[in-house]
Amino acid sequence: MHHFGGAAPLISIALRHKTDLNLSADQVANLEKIRSNFQAQVTPVAQQLRGYEDQIRTALQQTPANLVQVKSLIEQSEKLRSELRYLRIEALENGKTVLSAQQRDQLKTLVTTMHQNFRKQHQPQQAS
């Protein structure tokens, strides 16, 4: 789901760090509701997308491939990708409205720090 659900992880990060962000009980409840709604909306769309991708792979294994069918499947899958993108943006925007400006800034700093730490841990070691 991470591939399709970039928004949910950000909301999940905020929820995991609710103490650091000083989230109220109402904020936690609202963020959990946004995350649940996002996951409920994304799951069937992501399943449909996987189905189209499987159909594309199957169609490409035929010799010769039915290019009209492949093109149609690609177009249908791209509509689903745009729907997933919109749902992600919608969840992020809804999540932002729950947080104060200070909490949004704290979350940005937290995420930046997490990314920096991740990069440090996954850099190739230099030979001395």
Image (spheres, rainbow, N blue to C red):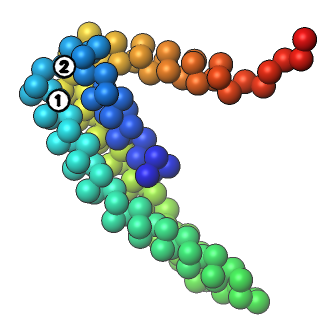
Nearest the camera: 128 or 94? Answer: 128
Percent x, y for residue 82?
43, 54
Percent x, y for residue 75?
51, 69
Q: Secondary structure at mark 1?
A: helix
The crowd level at tag 1 (other Cα within 10 Å; few <14, some 14-19, many 20+) is some
Q: Quadrant of residue 27?
A: top left
Name the quadrant of the C terminus: top right
Can you say whether 88 is above or below 41 in the image?
above
Return the mark for residue 23.
2
Left-right relation of 121 to 85: right
Left-right relation of 105 to 96: right
Residue at the front extreme, as displayed: 128
Nearest the camera: 89 or 108? Answer: 108
Residue at the image point whose x is 12% and y is 20% from the top: 24
- Mark 1–mark 2 CB contact (< 8 Å): yes
Q: As shown in the figure, which amino acid type bears the numbered disc 1? A: Val
Specify which label sits upstream in the sequence, 1 or 2. 2
The crowd level at tag 2 (other Cα within 10 Å; few <14, some 14-19, many 20+) is some
C-alpha gap between disc 1 and disc 2: 6 Å
Percent x, y for residue 56?
60, 76
Q: Quadrant of residue 98?
A: top left
Residue at the image point whose x is 56% and y is 79% from the top: 55
Can you say whether 91 is above or below 64 in the image?
above
Q: Is residue 89 visible?
A: no
Q: Which residue is mark 1?
A: 28
Q: Secondary structure at mark 2?
A: loop
Left-right relation of 73 to 82: right
Nearest the camera: 59 or 30? Answer: 30
